[in-house]
Amino acid sequence: MSSFSVTEPSTKQKWIAGVLVIGYALITLMPLLWILSTGFKSSTDSIAYPPKITFEPTLEGYVNLFTTQTRQSQDYLAANPPETWYEEIVHAKGMVIAGPSRFGERFMNSVIIGFGSTFLSVFLGTLAAYAFSRYRIPLKDDLLFFILSTRMMPPIAVAIPIFLMFRTLGLSDTHAGMILLYTAVNLSLSVWLLKGFIDEIPREYEEAALIDGYTRIQAFYKVVLPQAATGIAATAIFCLIFAWNEYAFAVLLTSGTAQTAPPFIPTIIGVGGQDWPAVAAGASLFLLPVMVFTILLRKHLLRGITFGAVRK
C-alpha cells in the first residue's frame, strides 16, 4: 500500500501547476517583450500592419531618444559626412543632430524624486511605526486609522488644492515639492507596513540592550533596525514603485525643471508623428532602475512579505 500525503502534491498536480505558472509568466511578459523589441525597430517596422515579429534590428529609436534632430538639404549632408555610427543613422533620414534631448535630464529628475521620496518615506515611517509599536500613545488606534484613511482617498481627488497650495508656496515644478508630495502619499503605507514588522520583534531584545547600558536610541539603531531590515526593504520597494511610476501629479505640478520621465516619454514626436521606437526605448530604460533595485532586494522582499505569517 503506497503512502499518501494530503500536503504533498502529486506529480500530475506539479506538472499542471508548472504549466499554469509558465503560461501566466509568458502572458505577463508579452507586453514587456513587445516594448523591448519595438525599441529596436525602425519607424516603418514599428507601425507596420500586420505587426512584424521578425525585423532587422536598429538603434534608431535610442538615437532619436537621446538627440534632437533637424532636417538639412542634400548639399549640406554631402558637405558634412557623418563621423559616428549614430550620425550615420540620422543622416540616412536626411537629418543631422542638433543637440542632446531632454530625456537624460528627465530621467535624472525621476531618480532624484523617486529615491529621495522613498528614503524620506521609509525614514519617517520607521520612526513613526516604532513609536506606535513601543509606546503608549493616546488614541493610538484612531491615529492609525486616520493615517490609513489618507491612503483610501485617490490622490488625484486633491489635485486642485495641492496645485493651489504649491503655487502659493513656490513649490511648483521643484524637486523639493515633488519629494514632499510623494513622501506624504507614501507615508501611510510605510507606517502601516513597518509597524507590522516591528510588532513582530520581541521587546526582550531591547530590554536586554537597555540593561547592558544602551540608550533607547542605541537600542533602536543596533537592535531593532537590523531585525526590521526585511520589512524596511519591502516597504522601500513599494514606495519606490509608486513614486517612480506616478503620472498625474507629475503632469499637473511639473513642466520643465522637475518634470520626470513618465510625462515626458509620451510626448516624444518624430518626423511623421509619434516616434514609437523612441517611446519604447525610453520605456525600456525607464524600467531598469526599479527592476535592478527590486532584484537587489528580492531576498528581503520575499522574506518581508511572509514575515510574521507563522506564529508559534
Image (tube, rainbow, N blue to C red):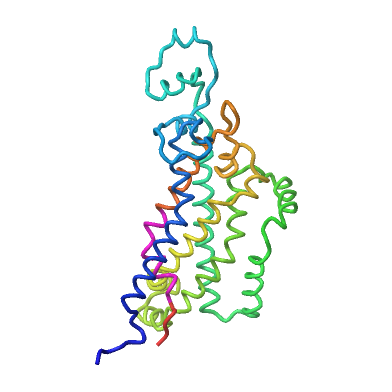
What is the x, y in percent for residue 59? 41, 32
Say whether residue 57 is left or right of residue 99: left
Q: How many marks?
A: 0
User: Residue most toward the bottom?
Assistant: 1
Image quadrant where residue 259 sits: top right
* Depth check, front residue: 144 or 50: 50
Secondary structure of the magenta portion, mostly?
Answer: helix
What is the x, y in percent for residue 140? 62, 78
* Above/below status of 30 relative to 109: below
What is the x, y in percent for residue 22? 39, 62
Say whether residue 172 is left or right of residue 119: right
Question: In the rendered structure, does residue 179 fall within the stretch colored magenta?
Answer: no
* Depth check, front residue: 78 or 305: 78
Q: Residue at x 55, y 17 (%)?
A: 71
Image quadrant where residue 308 sits: bottom left
Image quadrant where residue 58 sits: top left
Q: Quadrant of the C terminus?
A: bottom left
* Above/below status of 87 relative to 249: above
Q: Quadrant of the N terminus?
A: bottom left
Q: Residue at x 31, y 76 (%)?
A: 11
Q: Residue at x 41, y 25 (%)?
A: 86
Say whether residue 28 is left or right of residue 11: right
What is the x, y in percent for residue 76? 49, 9
The residue stretch that appears in magenta: 293-307
* Depth check, front residue: 33 or 266: 33
Q: Residue at x 46, y 49 (%)?
A: 32
